[in-house]
Amino acid sequence: MFKTINAKGLKEMMDRGEEFVLVNVLDRGSFENERICGSVNIPVAGIQDAVHRIKRNETVIVHCSGTECKASEFAARELEKLRFKDVRRFEGGLEEWKKEGFCLEGRLHEKAA
C-alpha cells in the first residue's frame, strides 16, 4: 500500500536534497499553467508511460489539484501494480502546496516581460 505525504513533509524532502520524482498527474494544460517547482507531468490517463520515464526503484510522489482530486490515488495504485517500489501520494496537491506558500511555476507564475 502506498504511503501518503503532506506539503511540509514534501518540502522537507526537497530541502534535504532527497532523491525522488514528483509527478503531477493532471492534464498537460493544467501542468503548463501551474505546477510545483521541479515536478514532471505524466497525466493519469497515461500513467503506464511512467515505466519508460522513471526507474522502478526510485521514490515516486504523485499529486493532483487537491484533496477532492482522486487522480493521484488512482495513479499511485497503478504505479504499485507496475511494481514501483516506493510510491507516495501527496493528497493535498497544489491546493495544500499553495496554502503553504511554497515554490510554484508555470504560466500563472511567469513574471510580466
Image (cartoon, rainbow, N blue to C red):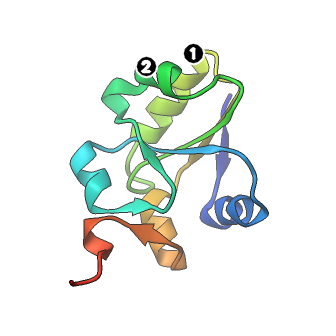
Give the quarter of the figure containing the N terminus. top right
Confirm or deny contact between disc 1 and disc 2 (CB under 8 A). Answer: no
Q: CA distance from mark 1 to mark 2?
A: 10 Å
Q: Position of residue 112 (x, y in %)?
A: 22, 84
Name the one closer to the observer, 77 or 44: 44
Residue 66 point in image, percent of width and height:
42, 57
Q: Residue furthest right?
A: 16
- Residue in view at x 56 percent, y 15 percent: 82
Q: Position of residue 79 (x, y in %)?
A: 55, 24
Residue 69, placed above or below residue 77: below
Q: Amino acid at mark 2?
A: Gln
Quadrant (top left/top right/bottom left/bottom right) for the C terminus: bottom left
Q: Is residue 18 above or below residue 15?
A: above
| Outermost residue to the front | 113
Residue 89 coordinates in the image, percent (x, y):
58, 43
| Residue located at (50% from left, 67% from top) | 96
Q: Residues within 10 Å of mark 1 (few under 14, many from 20)?
A: few
Q: Is residue 82 left or right of residue 98?
A: right
Mark carried by residue 81: 1
Amino acid under label 1? Lys
Secondary structure under tag 1 reads: helix
Q: Is residue 53 above or below residue 108?
A: above
The furthest residue to the top: 82
The disc placed on residue 48 is 2
Write the residue at 48% across / 76% down.
99
Q: Closer to the N terminus: mark 1 or mark 2?
A: 2
